[in-house]
Amino acid sequence: MFQTTLRRLAVLGAVLTTSAGLAAPSPVAAREVTPDHARWTPFQLVSAGHSLGWYPVKHRFEWEASKAEGPWKKVGAGGQYVHAGMLGLMAKQGEKGGVSTTWQTKGYDRGRWEVRLRTARESTGGADYAVRVELVPSAPKQERCGAQDIAILDFHPSQMSTANFYARTLPDTEFRTSRTLSRPVGGDEWHVYGVEVTPTHLRWFVDAKLVAEEKRPAAYSGVPLTMRVAMEPQKPGEVMNKTRVNLDWARYWTLDKKGKHPGSAGGTDQGTYKAAC
């Protein structure tokens, strides 16, 4: 009787295991996916897109259960890899140039972009990279030496808790501001950075909170943009510290859904971008 009971339990266990396997959702691969809010933890819900009701998302990219980098094109001497559900960008010790990766997607002149990332310096003795997450023209001929970029984040390790933001338009106009965060920007701290771009305003977000906005029409370029993550030397020829950036996910929403109003925030200072070409 005891042996018969064991055999029955074994058969029942096998059936339950098979059924669970059939019912389990497929892992999210390195591709665009549809969010399942019901399965998210509170930590995952720290997002302006979620808090303000921007969904449905048009493009969402992440690297869970995948080793594929997807449509992210690296430029520069550093390395790009996928590990532990993240896209990594690494600049080795002693490098003398920058490294970047760009989301190879259709450009949009307006919309909402958001990314969850962390960055860390992994060596000392050299110079520090500036870590930048920017919206850049999707057409290379419109680059103009950065004169039409929007910074979702501009971070310099010498100011560990300071996040800088800017928007540039031709011929050489720049709108810039900075915010001090309660946690470091670097030091492997996770943050969610985002920007909303419309013809009437630009809004910057950190960890689902509106931190800055600009309403002057001159801040809107109307150029189709895509996302780029970069580590850039501050001076040509500098020997750089080993530095890493990890992306957990990146998303793009259209403006089709109005969503909740985020409130108000301080503005930016208008100046000149001298490197325009």
Image (spheres, grey):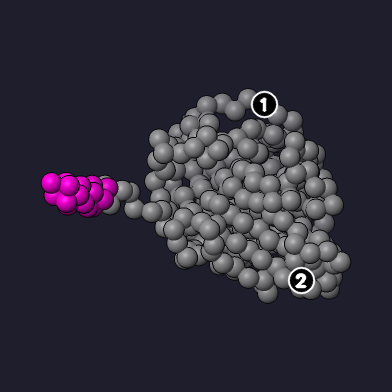
Which residue was labeled with disc 2? 93
Q: Quadrant of residue 122?
A: bottom right
| Lower sequence index among marks 2 and 1 | 2
Please name the residue shown 46% across and 50% down the image. 59
Horizontal arrangement in the rendering, residue 201 relative to residue 240 (left or right) = left
Please name the residue shown 86% across and 66% down the image. 125
Please name the residue shown 26% across and 50% down the image. 17
Q: Return the residue nearer the eye: 36 or 263.
A: 36
Which residue was labeled with disc 1? 264
x and y, in percent, of residue 150 in the image: 67, 49
Q: Amino acid at mark 1?
A: Ser
State the CA–CA distance, disc 2 to disc 1. 42 Å
x and y, in percent, of residue 113 in the image: 56, 46
Secondary structure mostly seen in the magenta stretch: helix
Q: Return the residue nearer the eye: 55 or 107.
A: 55
x and y, in percent, of residue 186 in the image: 74, 50
Q: Is residue 119 magenta?
A: no
Q: Return the residue nearer the eye: 212 or 214.
A: 212
